[in-house]
Amino acid sequence: MIGFWSVNDGYVMQRRLLKLHLFNLHISPHSVQQYWPWLIGGACVLLVILILLALTVGAVAIEFTSLGQWLHARLYGLAVPDKQTQLIVEALRLPRALLAAGVGALLAICGAAAQGLFRNPLADPALIGVSAGAAAGASLVIVFLGNTLVAGWFGVSLISLGAFAGAILVVVAVYRLATHQREGTTSAATMLLAGVAFSYLAGSLSNVLKFISNNDQLRQLSLWHMGGLEAANFTQVGLIAGVLLVVGGCLYGQYKALNALLLGESEARHLGINVKRVKGRVIVCIAAGVGVAVALSGVVAFIGLVVPHMVRMLLGPNHKYLLPMSACVGAMLLVLADTLARTIIAPTELPVGLMTAVLGAPVFISLLRHRKNYQ
Amino acid sequence: MLELKNISVKKGAAFIVSDVSLSLKAGEILSVIGPNGAGKSTLISAILGDVGLEAGQINFACAPIHAQPLQARARHIACLPQTSVLSFPFTVEEVVMLGRVPHSSGAKADRIIVEQAMALMDIGYLYGRPYTALSGGEKQRTQLARVMAQIWRKPDAEPRLLILDEPTSSLDLGHKQQLMAAVKYFAEQGVAVLMIEHDLNMVANYAHQLLALQCGHVVAYGEVSTQLSSALIKTLFGANTQVINHGGMLNIVNC
C-alpha cells in the first residue's frame, strides 16, 4: 500500500514539475512591475539580436565579421569596405527583417487589444474576419486598379487602402451583428460566428475576383494571398513603422480602459470609462493595423492569437505590460519565422504565412488543451 | 443626496419601473426588496444611466445625475454587479486595484487602500491568487472589495453612494454578517447605501429604509421598523411569515 502511494505521489510530482516547466511560467504582478524595464529592455535586445541574425542567414551567408564591419561603418558614417555585403544587407535583408518585425508587432498588439476588447482570449483579428475582409479589399484593388497603379509607392498605398477599407467594413459588420441593439452589450460567441460567416463571404468575393482576373493579376493575387515579405523595401518599412507608432500608441493609451473592460462593459462604465468611445477607437486601430499588415505581407496567421496568449501566461492580463510585450514578442516571432521560411528549403522560399500557420497551429492546440492551468 | 422623482423605465412596450420616487441621505442604508422580476435591478440600472428614463428625474448631489461627467461620477458612485463576467486571470489584488481607476491618487496610496479593502472583506489570504481560480463567495468578496476601494476615502469625493445588487447571494452566514458590518461601517462614515437584498432578516437588522417593489410599482416605502410586516411579505412574495420583535431585533420566521 505504501509502495502504491509513493509511486502515485511520484507520478503526481512528475506531472506537476512538467506543468511547472511548460505552462506555469507566471511572474507575479508585483515582480512584473518591479522588473518591467529589464523585461522589456531584454525583449528589445533579443529582437535586435534576432534581426542581426536574420541579416547573416540566407542564400549567401554573411560572416559575422563582415556584418560587424558593415554595422560599424554605417553607425559611424564611414564608407563600407565590402560592397556585396552592403548590397545584400541594405537592399534585401534589412528591409525584409524590419518589415517582418513591424508586421509581427502590429499583428500581435492588435490581437492583444482585440482579445481584451471582446473579453475573449480567442478573438484573433483573423477569426473575426478582419484578415479575410482586408484580403478581399486588396483583391478588388489589384483586379480593378492593379494594371495601372500597382507599381511604386502609389500602388502600395492603394492596395493598403483597399485592405484597410475591407478590414474596417468587415469589423463594423461583425461588430454590429454581435452587439445587442438596446443594451449595447457585445456577445463574443455571436461575434466569432459572425466572423466565420463574413470570412466566407469575403473569401468567396476573393475567389470570384480570381475567377475573372487575367493571368498577370491571378499570379499577383495568389502570391499576395500566401503572405510573403520578399517584396520588402524601405518605403514599406516606413509605412509600417508609422502605422505601428500611431496604432500602438493609441492602443497603449487605452490600457486602463482595456483592463477595466475585462470586468464587463457596464462595470467599466461604472468605473468612469466612456465605453462606446473606447470601443470605437480600439476597433478602428485594429482594423487599420491588421489591414495595413495584411496589405503589405498577405495573410500571416496565428501571430495575433498565439503571441498575446503566451505573454499573458507570463505576465498576466494587465494591458500596461501585455500590449508592449506582445508587440516585442510578435516582432521576434515573425522575424524568426521569416528567417526559417527563407532558409528551411533554400534556395526556394516558403511563404511566411504558411510558416506561421505550421508553427502556430500546434502551439494553439496545446494552449487550448492546457487552458485550465492558467485561467 | 440621491433623489428619484417619479421615474419610469420602459423595455419594449412594457413598463418595468413605473412612477418610483425615493430620497436617500448620507449615512442611510436603503434596502430594495421585492419578488423576482419586480424591477429592482432595472431601478439600479436607471440610477447608473445604463437604461434611459421614460419619465421622471434623478438628482445626485442636487444636480441631474446623467449630466455629470462619467469619470467624476465614478468617484462618487460605486456599484456591485449581480454577476461578474471576468474570465481573465487577474490576481485578486489587481481586481481590487481596478476600483481605483477613476482616481488619480498615486500608486502608493492606492496600494494601501487596496490592502485595507482586502482586509475589510477578509480576503487578505487570497493575495496573489488568480481571480479565475476562486470560489463563488471569494469572487463576490473580491468584487465587493473592489467597489469599496472605489469610494474608500472621504477626501477623494464627497458625497459617496454605494449600490449593491444582491451582495450576500453567494456568501456563507459568517461572511454575510461580516459584509453587512462593513456596509454599516461605510454608512457610519457618511456613505449612502442602496442595496437589493433577498434575505429579509438582513434587511430587518441592518437597513434604515425599505422600498418594496412589485411589478415596477412601489408597494411600501419608509422606515424598516414600521414598514416590514407579515402582511407586506404576504403581498410581495405570497409567503406566510411572522415578524417577531425580539428585544429590538426584528426576526422573520417562516410559518
Image: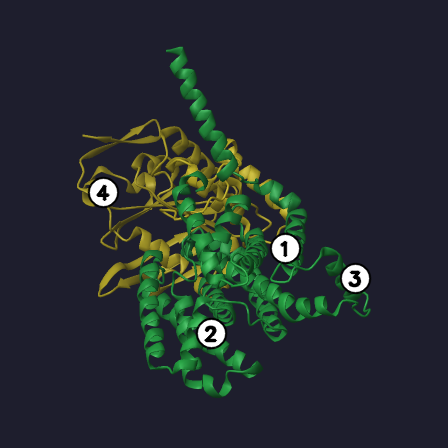
What's the distance in space between the residues labelled 3 and 4, CA to CA? 87 Å
Chain green in the figure, letter:
A
Q: How many labels does the image show?
A: 4
Q: Is residue A240 above or below residue A43?
A: below
Q: In which quarter of the image is the C terminus of chain A?
A: top left
Lower sequence index among marks 1 and 2: 1
Dot 1 and dot 4 within a common chain: no
Q: Name the residue under label 2.
A: A164
Circle 3: residue type: His
Q: In which quarter of the image is the N terminus of chain A?
A: top left
Horizontal arrangement in the rendering, residue A373 relative to residue A314 (left or right): left
Residue A240 coordinates in the image, percent (x, y): 58, 69
Chain hosting mark 2: A
Instruction: Name the front one of labels 3 and 4.
Output: 3
Chain B appears what colour? yellow
Q: Which label sits on residue A50?
A: 1
Residue B175 coordinates in the image, percent (x, y): 41, 32
Circle 2: residue type: Phe
What's the distance in space between the residues labelled 1 and 4, CA to CA? 74 Å
Dot 3 and dot 4 within a common chain: no
Provide the secondary structure element on which disc 1 rests. Answer: helix
Q: Is residue A229 visible?
A: yes
The residue sitting at the top extreme is: A1
Q: Which label sits on residue B232?
A: 4
Circle 1: residue type: Leu
Q: Name the residue under label 3.
A: A72
What's the distance in space between the residues labelled 1 and 2, CA to CA? 29 Å
Lower sequence index among marks 3 and 1: 1
Kindly indicate whether the residue at mark 2 contacts the one at mark 1 (C-beta within 8 angstroms). no
Residue A307 coordinates in the image, percent (x, y): 50, 53
Circle 2 residues within 10 Å: few <14, some 14–19, many ≥20: many
Circle 4 residues within 10 Å: few <14, some 14–19, many ≥20: some
